[in-house]
Image (cartoon, rainbow, N blue to C red):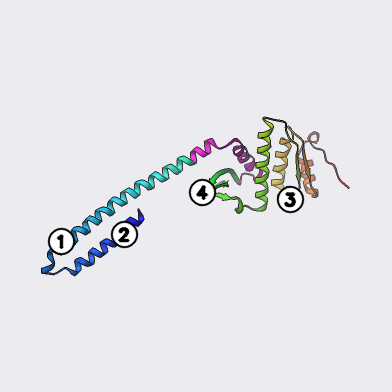
Amino acid sequence: MDRDTQRASQSIGSVGAGLRHWEDPDGGADAADASDDAQAHLARIRALAAEYARLRLAARLLSAEVERYREQHQGPVLSRASTLLARLTLNRYTGLRADFDDSDRPVLRCVRADGTKVPVDGLSDGTRDQLYLALRLATLERQAASGEPLPLILDDILIHFDDERAGAALAVLAEHARGTQVVLFTHHARIVDLAERLIPAQALRVSRLE
C-alpha cells in the first residue's frame, strides 16, 4: 500500500509538471487532460489511504486477540513457570510469554511488571538463573503429576541471587521438597544461614562436607 501511494504521488508530480508546461492558451486541451489525470490519481490515493487505515486497524485487533488467546490458553508448564518466576524475582517479572522473533521463530520472553517483554539474552545472570529454575520446577511438577517424582539436585544455583531472592528461592524449593527430595550443594555460608532461618527445622537437613 505504501509503495502504491508513493507511485501515485510521483505520478501526480509528473502531471503537475505537465500542467505547468501547458499553461498557455494553445495548451488548454492538454492541460485539461493532465488535470483529469491528476484528479484520478488523487482519487486513487484517497482509496489507498482508506484501505491502509482499514488494514492497519484489522492488524491491531488481530494482534490483540492473538495475545488474549495466548494468555488464556498457554501451556500448563509455562503458566506454572510464570507464577514461579514472579515469586523468584519478587514480582519484578510477572510472567512468561511464548512469542515469535522477526524470522517467525518461537522465542521465550519475560514480562516485566510494567508489561515490557524482555528476551532471555536481555536478562541479567541472576534473573536468567531464576528463569531456568522456574522452568525446571514447573517441568518436574508436571512430570510428577503423571509419574514417579524425581529427586532434584542443584549445585550452587543461588550464587547470583541477592539475599531477598535467595530467600524466595529457598522457600520455593522447600515447597517443592514436600513432594520429592531436593538436594542443594553450596559453598556459601550465607545460603546455609538463610535456609536455617527460613525453612522449618523438620523440613531441612544440613550436611557439612569436609
**Left or right side of 31 for 160:** right
Q: Which residue is mark 3?
A: 159
Whole-angstrom CA distance, mark 3 to mark 4, is: 35 Å
Magenta extent = 67-92
Q: Secondary structure at mark 2?
A: helix
Q: Which residue is mark 1?
A: 32
Whole-angstrom CA distance, mark 3 to mark 1, is: 80 Å
Q: Residues within 10 Å of mark 1 (few under 14, many from 20)?
A: some
| Kind of residue sitting beneath label 2 | Arg
Mark toward the viewer: 3 or 1: 1
1 or 4: tag closer to the N-terminus: 1
| Kind of residue sitting beneath label 1 | Ala
Q: Secondary structure at mark 1?
A: helix
Whole-angstrom CA distance, mark 2 to mark 1, is: 22 Å
Q: What residue is rendered at 68% in x and 41% in y?
A: 136
Q: Which residue is mark 2?
A: 7
